[in-house]
Amino acid sequence: MAKSILVLITKPPYGFEEAFAGSRLALAMLSSGNVERSDIILAGDGTLNAVAGQKPEVVGMPSNMEALQDMVDFDAKVYCIRSDLEERVGNAPTLDFVEMIDWAKAKEIIDQHDMVTTF
């Protein structure tokens, strides 16, 4: 049985269900005890999930920020590829609990997990 899972979120927070589903999967795997470690990397358009000050209620969508914060409450890590985020929104403020990394560090993190799934 796998001891860890990494969820790679590549879709933006709104307009697609993948970011919502990916963050909930990571949280469910950890909170249920199915794995000892569950982390998230936000990459590509998924980095938009790390932008602070979002108001999902305006577009009638659930908040992905809450699930990401819940991950941290379970001592999990939420990482964001800095270059991908900057490419999309420049130097926008991000959620304070999200750790900015580069692709080299992302590859190291990926290698540390037994399972990797992409949303």
Image (cartoon, rainbow, N blue to C red):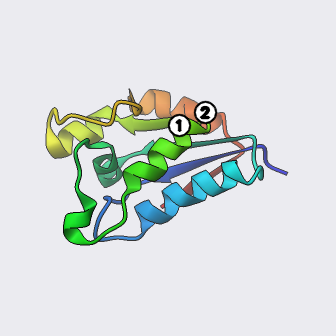
Give the left or right position of residue 81, taking residue 55 as reference.
right
Instruction: Please say if the residues under marks 1 and 2 sit with CB atoms less than 8 Å apart.
Output: yes
- Tell me what residue is drawn at x 37 percent, y 65 percent: 62
Circle 2 — which element?
loop
* Residue 18, image x, y percentages: 43, 66
Q: Quadrant of residue 102?
A: top left
* Residue 90, image x, y percentages: 14, 37
Q: CA distance from mark 1 to mark 2?
A: 5 Å
The amino acid type, in three-letter code, at marker 1 is Val
Give the left or right position of residue 118, taking residue 16 as reference.
right
- Give the labeled residue for mark 1: 72
- Furthest-front residue in this view: 57
- Give the labeled residue for mark 2: 75
- Furthest-right residue in this view: 1
Circle 1 — which element?
helix
Q: In the displayed structure, would residue 90 be above or below residue 104?
A: below
How busy is the neighbourhood of tag 2: few (under 14 within 10 Å), some, or many (20 plus)?
few
Q: Nearer the viewer, residue 13 or 102?
A: 13
- Tell me what residue is drawn at x 45 percent, y 28 percent: 104
* Residue 66, image x, y percentages: 43, 50
- Tell me what residue is drawn at x 55 percent, y 51 percent: 7
The amino acid type, in three-letter code, at marker 2 is Asp
Give the left or right position of residue 71, taking residue 100 as reference.
right
* Residue 86, image x, y percentages: 20, 37
- Tell me what residue is drawn at x 75 percent, y 40 percent: 36
Instruction: Determine which of the numbered discs, if any, sits on residue 118 in the image.
Output: none
Q: In the displayed structure, would residue 16 be above or below residue 32?
A: below
Give the left or right position of residue 87, taking residue 50 as reference.
left
